């Protein structure tokens, strides 16, 4: 079946999922998982599934980029098992954000045909659909993106990323220095856009991340080991800023609390 838009949702465990045919669950990190969730995995064809502890949901975006049937849709989006983008006209999203559990039937009220139609319409007018930007998570509400990364993660990883950008994509350097002073960002690597934009973005992103991987020591700590997931959240912000993409912002439907 041909859809204008398909939302791919990253699952690493069994969880409530939408029933809509245009939302496709993908099991991430399947190459190193003992569980089979019954979904297509990110471990076939050209894949980086085994790198999931470092790359997080990017193992799914890489798999889609390299292997998905492009004739199945014109646009696609990266979602999470517990997070979906929904149009901002929904009037009771606050209740859903606070919900600890939500049934598939109820999900259809938010991710059904009406939402699909709205997404398709908005993609005719905007380059990308993304979450609303949020203030940076941390103790100091006035800290910049650069400062926040150094507080929450490992400064050397940020420095290595800037160095790679300076060498491989020098036209981005000025944008990097501007955007890293921002105090808000788009979180979770979530975006819905065309194949053309995804191709350009993912080619750029993985060239940077794979090179950074050769220059840093991957931490043993299971949280900090997710370095490329953390870096890519910031780099997506840089990409949309530098390329002046026209953005439609959607609400993030949080099915599970943080």
Image (spheres, grey):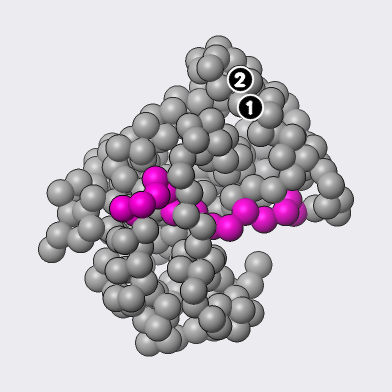
- Front-most of residues 53 and 108: 108
Residue 218 horizontal/vertical position (percent): 63, 33
Residue 106 horizontal/vertical position (percent): 42, 86
**Residue 255's quadrant in the figure?**
bottom right
- For image coordinates 46% across by 40% down, the residue present is 245
Residue 100 highlighted magenta (yes or no): no
The quadrant the C terminus occupies is bottom right
Residue 124 horizontal/vertical position (percent): 31, 53
Instruction: Tell me, yes or no, if residue 15 can be seen here.
Output: yes
Is 123 placed left or right of 207 in the picture? left
Is 154 placed left or right of 41 in the picture? right
Residues drawn in magenta: 123-137
Q: Eyeballing the image, is 163 above or below 138?
A: above
- For image coordinates 72% across by 27% down, the residue present is 156
**Residue 221's quadrant in the figure?**
top right
- For image coordinates 33% across by 35% down, the residue present is 199
Q: Residues within 10 Å of mark 1 (few under 14, many from 20)?
A: many
- Dot 1 corresponds to which residue? 176
**Residue 110's quadrant in the figure?**
bottom left
Is 48 placed left or right of 186 in the picture? left
- Dot 2 corresponds to which residue? 173
């Amino acid at each position: 079946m041909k859809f204008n838009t398909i939302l791919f949702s990253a699952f690493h465990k069994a969880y409530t999922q939408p029933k809509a045919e245009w939302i496709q669950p993908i099991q991430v990190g399947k190459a190193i998982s003992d569980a089979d969730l019954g979904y297509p995995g990110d471990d076939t064809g050209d894949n980086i599934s085994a790198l999931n502890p470092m790359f997080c949901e990017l193992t799914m975006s890489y798999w889609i980029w390299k292997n998905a049937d492009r004739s199945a849709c014109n646009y696609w989006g990266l979602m999470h098992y517990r997070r979906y983008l929904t149009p901002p006209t929904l009037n009771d999203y606050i209740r859903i954000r606070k919900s600890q559990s939500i049934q598939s039937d109820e999900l259809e009220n938010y991710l059904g045909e009406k939402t699909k139609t709205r997404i398709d319409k908005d993609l005719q007018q905007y380059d990308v659909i993304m979450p609303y930007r949020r203030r940076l998570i941390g103790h100091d509400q006035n800290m910049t993106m650069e400062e926040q990364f150094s507080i929450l993660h490992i400064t050397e990883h940020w420095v290595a990323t800037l160095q790679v950008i300076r060498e491989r994509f020098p036209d981005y350097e000025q944008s990097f220095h501007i955007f890293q002073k921002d105090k808000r960002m788009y979180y979770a690597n979530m975006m819905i856009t065309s194949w053309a934009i995804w191709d350009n973005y993912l080619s750029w992103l993985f060239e940077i991340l794979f090179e950074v991987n050769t220059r840093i020591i991957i931490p043993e700590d299971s949280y900090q080991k997710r370095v490329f997931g953390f870096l890519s959240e910031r780099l997506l912000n840089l990409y949309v800023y530098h390329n002046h993409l026209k953005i439609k912002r959607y609400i993030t439907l949080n099915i599970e609390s943080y």
